[in-house]
Amino acid sequence: MLAVKGILSGSREDLLSVAKFQKGILVCILFQLGAIIGQLALPPEIRLLISIAVLVVGIVSSVFVFMLAIKVYGTALGVLLGVLSLVPCIGLIVLLIVNGKATSVLKQNGIKVGLLGANLSAIGC
């Protein structure tokens, strides 16, 4: 079994977890950007629903950031980044930073990463 680069445990299973969590983060980024545009473009009656959706996506993205950051940064930084991802505006920056780290870890291990993340079948645990 070859050691995996960039992941604290060095296991291939954790590399698959990083790819899955990155896909979740990418979907959350997409939803957050869409919600920001929606809040600016839609009438006030619908903005409340969008605000609720933003709250839910923020919580989900915080969980993905926490789980991914634990794999690549460690527990303490994972908790810090998870909490920071709940802060408006800063949370989106945290999502982008953690996504960038996941992309570099996957590329270090020879996995191609596209617009919506890595092909999970290419990792093959």
Image (cartoon, rainbow, N blue to C red):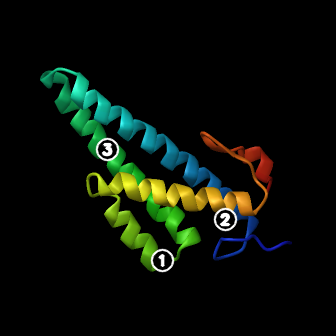
User: Marks 1 and 2, Cα distance to the nearest angstrom?
Assistant: 14 Å
Residue 117: x %, y % from top left? 62, 45
Vertical position of residue 111 compared to residue 15: above or below: above
Asked if residue 79 can be seen in this view, the reply is: yes
For disc 3, the marked residue is 56
Seen at 61% across and 39% down, the residue is: 115
Q: What's the residue at 31%, 44% (across, down)?
A: 56
1 and 2 marks in contact (CB < 8 Å): no
User: Which residue bears the numbered disc 2?
Assistant: 14
Residue at image location 19% in from the left, 24% down from the top? 46
Residue 93 placement, left or right of 112? left
Q: Are marks 2 and 3 in contact (CB under 8 Å)?
A: no
Whether residue 17 can be seen here = no
The three-letter code of the residue at mark 3 reads: Val
Mark sitting earlier along the chain (2/3)? 2
The C terminus: image quadrant: bottom right
Measured as percent of width and height from the top left, residue 22 is found at: 56, 52
| Depicted 112 relative to depicted 109: above or below | above
> How dense is the environment of label 3, judged by Cα within 10 Å: few (below 14), some, or many (20 and up)?
few
Q: Say what secondary structure mark 1 lies in.
A: helix
Instruction: Note whether 31 is above or below 17 in the view shown.
Output: above
Image height of 25 relative to 42, above or below: below
Which residue, given by chain and number where applicable, does mark 1 sit on?
75
